[in-house]
Amino acid sequence: MYLTPIFVDLLMLDNSNFGGKKLGKFRFGSKDGLNYSFNAELLPVRSNGEIIRYRVVGTSGDFGFGYSFITKRNTLGKRNRQQIFSQIMDKYGLQK
């Protein structure tokens, strides 16, 4: 999931320690099973030193997606990413 810099500026998010923006904590997991906490952030994607878009990244213990240090085995699956993206869109009103 990617967002434009203009839209991210409109959301007025706090800065993170890694040069991005904090989105907050979200949950993922099976419907009847355990739910896991997930910390999401927006990291800038740059071209020639200029931010062209932000991408959603995050971690949950050893698992997550978007970071280079997370192995393919520990990358969250499509269904879990969809759950997180849906919650982000609901929280920040991105459907409008």
Image (tube, rainbow, N blue to C red):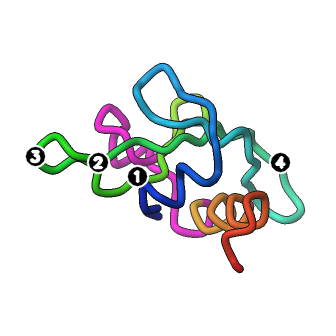
Q: Is 34 or 55 nearer to us in this picture? A: 55
Dot 2 crowding, Cα within 10 Å, few <14, some 14–19, many 20+: few
Earlier along the polypeptide chain: callout 1 or callout 4?
4
Foreground label between 1 and 2: 2
Labelled pair 1, 2 in contact (Cβ < 8 Å): yes
Mark linked to residue 48:
3
Dot 4 crowding, Cα within 10 Å, few <14, some 14–19, many 20+: few
The boundaries of the magenta stretch are: 64-80
Amino acid tagged 3: Asn
Amino acid tagged 4: Leu
Amino acid tagged 2: Ile
Earlier along the polypeptide chain: callout 3 or callout 4?
4
Mark linked to residue 54:
1
Write the residue at 89% across / 62% down: 32
Judge whether residue 79 is colored magenta: yes
Judge whether residue 17 is colored magenta: no
Measured Cα–Cα span from mark 3 to mark 1 = 15 Å
Q: Which residue does the numbered mark 4 point to in the structure image?
A: 34
Q: Which residue does the numbered mark 2 point to in the structure image?
A: 51
Measured Cα–Cα span from mark 2 to mark 3 = 8 Å
